[in-house]
Amino acid sequence: MFGRDKEKVSTTAQSAATASTAAPAAYGSNTAARPVASTDGQMPKIETVVGANCRFSGTMQSDGGIRIDGVFEGNLHTTGNIVVTESATVIAEIQAYNITVSGSIKGNITANKIEITETGKLWGDLNINTILLHEGAYHEGQTNMANAVAPPSIEPSRLGRLPQIGASSKSLKDEEKS
């Protein structure tokens, strides 16, 4: 009788403690750099972290999420998400599923979606499906969208020929008769 209530309270307290400490540890204190929760409500798993005091040069390949707080130079390839925090500097060719940029990136990017926050800066070409730019975000380069839509075209006027400016009413009446 008394054991059930204690177990229930203990489990709830542990879940709340884990949730409140896991998010800041996994995604840093910058809430703008946090990836969006997936459809099942779970945060994408960050498996690899380049710390704030770390400098990494080379090629990194992963099937999981990557968070960069420090300096990265080289090539990044992941089927997961990449989070570049405010303190990060990245000079790389990047391929990822989703990318959130709050720091600085120089290099070309291929991704499903990119989000550049108000502190994010990006120099390079984008090959993406979706882009989200916050007010204050910076991007210099070309953007190629895979799901490109044809631009609207301007159709000729259905009213017929418009009168010329300065034409007299007599000449307009003559044109209407013919």
Image: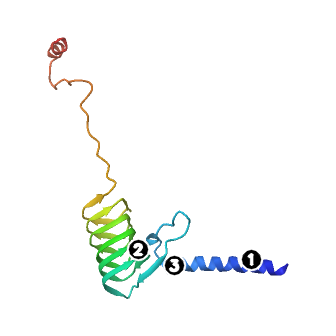
Location of mark 1 (residue):
8
Cβ–Cβ under 8 Å for marks 3 and 1: no
Mark 2 vs mark 1: which is more N-terminal?
1
Location of mark 2 (residue):
83
Report x, y in % for residue 11: 70, 78
Give the secondary structure at mark 1.
Answer: helix
Taking 118 as reference, is 73 left or right? left
Name the disc covering residue 24, or none.
3
Give the secondary structure at mark 2.
Answer: strand
Seen in the picture, residue 47 relative to 159 is either above or below; the reply is below
Q: CA distance from mark 3 to mark 2?
A: 13 Å
Q: CA distance from mark 3 to mark 1?
A: 26 Å
Q: Quadrant of residue 109?
A: bottom left
Mark 3 vs mark 2: which is more N-terminal?
3
Report x, y in % for residue 8: 74, 77
Q: Quadrant of residue 147?
A: bottom left
Seen in the picture, residue 170 relative to 21 is either above or below; the reply is above
- Badge 3 crowding class, 10 Å Cα cut-off, few under 14, some 14 to 19, many 20 or more, is few
Name the disc covering residue 95, or none.
none
Seen in the picture, residue 118 relative to 29 is either above or below; the reply is above
